């Protein structure tokens, strides 16, 4: 996962520059951080577990540096395992994003000749590069030779004091080259380049970048050909501040009314995708985590419209195992915030190998997914910093409502009669004190059950995920119709159960479930068009058809946020997680 960074340029106060770039990439991994710089005779470094501090007690000037924010895959979270890793003479350093799948074999090949200081797979790269240099290779040839020995998805940035160079290369891990004047940068994400570079270029897979103080050379190592970078401006809106809010999570929850307006004004964006959907007979919606739950909601709605189309929602990590290859009849629609999620990127490779059409609902418009699918529909949510997906999930749901309407040949998903009640209900729940009181009750619970039928169940899945990841309270979603077939055994005195239902059968089924739970002492919260006696507590939302899901989602998100804060968890950075899951 992790964020990696490299700098070659004029001598500059290096620690503030690299640490500020690393802070923008902490969403990619925040269990430890590290910065290494050339201090004239060797590499020096600062590394530590935890978040990148705002103030680091080091003020060197340097023109050669690398940095890293880590999400551990090999070895515990510790200063020793934090990147960069260096050779014993502190002349070569590496930062790495990915998993070296053949690390054990490569370790054996070093035959005890290297002194390892960490438990990471990444440190192997340094020792292998040093061995290649000892064989007489040039630095860039040495890095190329080592990269070709690695299996898995990896991006490596290797710095060499002797030549003053950085050599970097990637396979299925994002890497951007940035430049301003004669200064050159490498970063996993454009966010890290926003303040320091004017232009950036995506580094294609298997392209070796060799940066020195005068230039950057790019070469495709498989074809042996020079690659000319395609420079684009660094996105200006990449940098966001938390503003008046305590956390990005709540800021992003509050961004949603504006987002609703923005998406409503851009309804036509979905037209090419709607046309593509109706011309395919197999539609696979996919994503990971919240995006997968959003996909299940879209699949449910589209399945009801598309009689001739086989519609399924499958987690990206399961597609290879569970979907039949239907060749060019298939349209694979990926839902993704970052556009870099490894499992989603893999799915698109698989889809292309089938000859399928690829499409995405994607938030980061410069991302790997957005730039490589046949049809990309922007989510327009703006930068989402919190690890908890909120506004990106909301946008995915809204885009799918628009798709359903476009497939039906209807011009607007939220017409005038619907937009106003949806928008005012969202605004109501963004400030409603009842949610604060309910959160105080739920934050002391060991378990929360979330329940629903059909679309209500999909929202219940997302609600349970938000509560789990935001506050570490165990929350689990069930179908209301399945309650008495097992989950009811979990209900005892006071067990909190959140019931989501938009209308019709969903409400009827939730009412039955609520009665059964209350009869056994459970505490039910009905979110939807319930009457007060139906549940222990009703958070009333009008019957707004499918669009009511947008309101239910906001209630679930705000509740999860308030529970997290009540339990003292920073929901922007929950333990063990990272926002963009770029490892498999
Ligand atoms: N495998 C490396 C480690 O555990 C890098 C992990 C990452 O990409 O975050 O340090």
Image: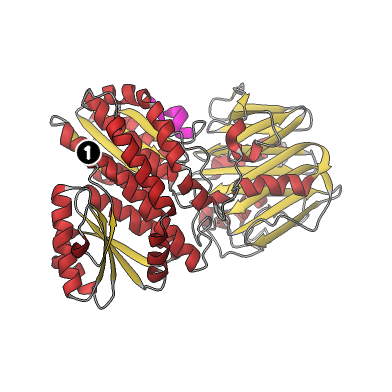
Question: Which residue is labeled 1 in the image?
Answer: 301
Viewer-proximal residue among 158 and 360: 360
Counting from the top left corner in percent of width and height, residue 276 is at 28, 23
Counting from the top left corner in percent of width and height, residue 158 is at 67, 43
Which color scheme is applied?
A: secondary structure
Counting from the top left corner in percent of width and height, residue 340 is at 47, 40
Compared to 198, does 572 lie above or below?
A: below
Residue depicted at x 19% and y 53%: 453
Q: Write down the region rendered in magenta.
A: 368-378
The residue at label 1 has a CB less than 8 Å from ligand 1: no
Compared to 532, does 400 lie above or below?
A: above
Q: Is residue 80 magenta?
A: no
Q: Is residue 569 visible?
A: yes
Helix, strand, or loop for circle 1? Answer: helix
Residue closest to the far right? 40
Q: Is residue 370 magenta?
A: yes
Viewer-proximal residue among 21 and 35: 21
Left or right? Give the position of 399 relative to 185: left
Viewer-proximal residue among 212 and 16: 16
- For disc 1, the neighbor class at 10 Å (few under 14, some 14 to 19, many from 20) is many
Viewer-proximal residue among 139 and 202: 202
Number of marks present in the image shown: 1
Among the 4 quarters of the image, the one containing residue 53: bottom right
Among the 4 quarters of the image, the one containing residue 111: bottom right
Residue depicted at x 59% and y 36%: 238
Q: Is residue 315 visible?
A: no
Compared to 110, does 279 lie above or below?
A: above
Left or right? Give the position of 454 relative to 379: left
């Amino acid at each position: 996962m992790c964020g990696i960074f490299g700098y070659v340029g004029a001598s500059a106060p290096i620690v503030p520059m690299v640490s500020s770039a690393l802070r923008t990439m902490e969403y990619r991994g925040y269990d430890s951080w590290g910065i290494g710089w050339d201090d004239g005779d060797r590499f020096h470094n600062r590394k530590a577990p935890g978040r990148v501090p705002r103030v680091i007690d080091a003020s060197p000037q340097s023109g050669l540096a690398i940095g890293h924010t880590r999400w551990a895959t090999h070895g515990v979270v510790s200063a020793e395992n934090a990147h960069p890793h260096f050779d014993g003479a502190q002349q070569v350093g590496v930062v790495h994003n990915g998993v070296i799948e053949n690390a054990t074999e490569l370790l054996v090949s070093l035959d005890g000749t290297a002194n390892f200081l960490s438990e990471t797979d990444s440190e192997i790269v340094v020792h292998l590069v040093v061995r290649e240099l000892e064989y007489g290779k040039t630095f860039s040839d040495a890095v190329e030779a080592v990269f070709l020995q690695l299996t898995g998805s990896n991006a490596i940035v290797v710095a060499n004091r002797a030549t003053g160079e950085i050599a970097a290369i990637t396979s299925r891990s994002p890497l951007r080259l940035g430049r301003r004047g004669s200064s050159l940068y490498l970063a996993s994400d454009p966010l890290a380049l926003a303040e320091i570079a004017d232009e950036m270029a995506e580094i294609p897979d298997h392209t070796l970048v060799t940066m020195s103080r005068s230039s950057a050379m790019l070469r495709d190592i498989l074809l042996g050909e020079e690659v000319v970078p395609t420079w684009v401006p660094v996105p200006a809106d990449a940098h966001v501040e938390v503003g008046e809010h305590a956390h990005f999570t709540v800021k992003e929850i509050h961004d949603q009314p504006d987002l609703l307006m923005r998406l409503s004004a851009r309804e036509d964006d979905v037209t090419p995708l709607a046309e593509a959907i109706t011309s395919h007979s197999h539609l696979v919606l996919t994503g990971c985590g919240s995006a997968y739950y959003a996909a299940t909601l879209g699949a449910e709605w589209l399945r009801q419209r598309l009689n001739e189309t086989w519609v399924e929602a499958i987690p990206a990590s399961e597609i290879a195992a569970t979907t039949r290859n239907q060749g060019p009849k298939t349209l694979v629609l990926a839902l993704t915030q970052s556009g870099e999620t490894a499992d989603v990127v893999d799915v698109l490779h698989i889809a292309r190998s089938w000859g399928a059409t690829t499409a995405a609902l994607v938030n980061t418009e410069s991302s790997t997914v957005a730039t490589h699918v046949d049809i990309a529909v922007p989510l327009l949510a703006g930068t989402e910093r919190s690890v908890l997906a909120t506004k990106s999930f909301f946008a995915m749901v809204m885009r799918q409502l628009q798709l359903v309407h476009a497939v039906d040949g209807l011009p607007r998903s939220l017409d005038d009669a619907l937009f106003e009640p949806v928008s005012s209900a969202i605004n109501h729940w963004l400030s409603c004190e009842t949610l604060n009181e309910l959160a105080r009750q739920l934050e002391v619970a060991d378990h929360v059950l979330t329940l629903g039928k059909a679309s209500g169940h999909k929202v219940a899945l997302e609600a349970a995920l938000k509560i789990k990841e935001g506050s570490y309270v165990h929350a689990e979603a069930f179908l209301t119709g399945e309650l008495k077939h097992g989950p009811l055994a979990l209900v005892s005195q006071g067990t909190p159960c959140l019931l989501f239902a938009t209308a019709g059968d969903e409400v009827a089924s939730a009412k039955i479930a609520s009665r059964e739970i209350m009869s056994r002492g459970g505490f039910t919260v009905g979110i939807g068009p319930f009457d007060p006696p139906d549940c222990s507590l009703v958070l009333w939302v009008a019957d707004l058809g499918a669009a009511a899901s947008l309101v239910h989602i906001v209630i679930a998100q705000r509740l999860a946020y308030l529970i997290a804060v009540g339990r003292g968890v920073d929901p922007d950075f929950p333990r063990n997680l990272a926002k963009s899951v770029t490892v498999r």
